[in-house]
Amino acid sequence: MTRQQLTSLIAGSAKVRVWDTPVNTAIIDRAERRLEHPFPESYRWFLEQYGSGYFGSYELNGVATPAHVEGADEDISEFIGDVVARHEANRSRESWDSRYVELLNIEGDEIYYFDTRHGLVDDEYPVVLIQPAAAPDEFAMRFSGFISRIV
């Protein structure tokens, strides 16, 4: 899917609404360092264009710029919808596998994650769906595929 197709898909969607608060490269780089995982190419593009958004009434985790302007040790837990803040909250759970990076949580019943276990492949991570008491299920091969499926 091209960026132009993805832009059109998002613009025409009743389900996905975007913040339209682009995030600059320096802030994205800082968020990646704090996350300890590089962002996939299509997600970086999404952040540079929109910052974040919503799927229905649920936060589609992005990067909240103010969370990444302060010192690297700053508590950013109050930044709802920030992928790094969400990851740090998940990572604090004892049994959590930190190789899963949360993108979207629908009532705890459907949670979508980047699966970073095998690193970037063609500059992308697959997106997996994890439901209660179920093994991860591959949902899309890349972030753009994830967006096209949820729209």
Image (cartoon, rainbow, N blue to C red):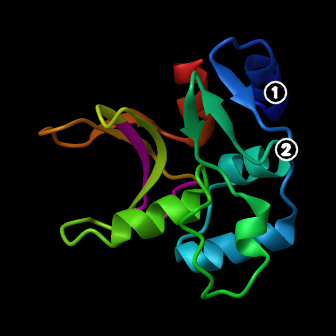
Is 147 above or below relative to 14? below
Magenta-drawn stretch contains 23: no
Place of residue 96 in the rendered image (x, y in percent of width and height, measured from the top left): 25, 65
Q: Which residue is mark 2?
A: 49
> Which residue is disc 1 drawn over?
7
Q: Which residues are magenta?
A: 111-123
Name the residue rendered at 77%, 48% in the picture: 51
Badge 2, how many Cα within 10 Å: few under 14, some, many 20+? some
- Left or right? Give the position of 39 relative to 126: right
Cβ–Cβ under 8 Å for marks 1 and 2:
yes
Question: Who is closer to the viewer here, 99 or 22?
Answer: 22
Q: Residue at x 53, y 22 (%)?
A: 150
Under circle 2, the secondary element is: helix
112 part of magenta stretch: yes
- Evaluate whether residue 99 shows in this view: no
- Residue 73 screen position, x and y as percent: 60, 88
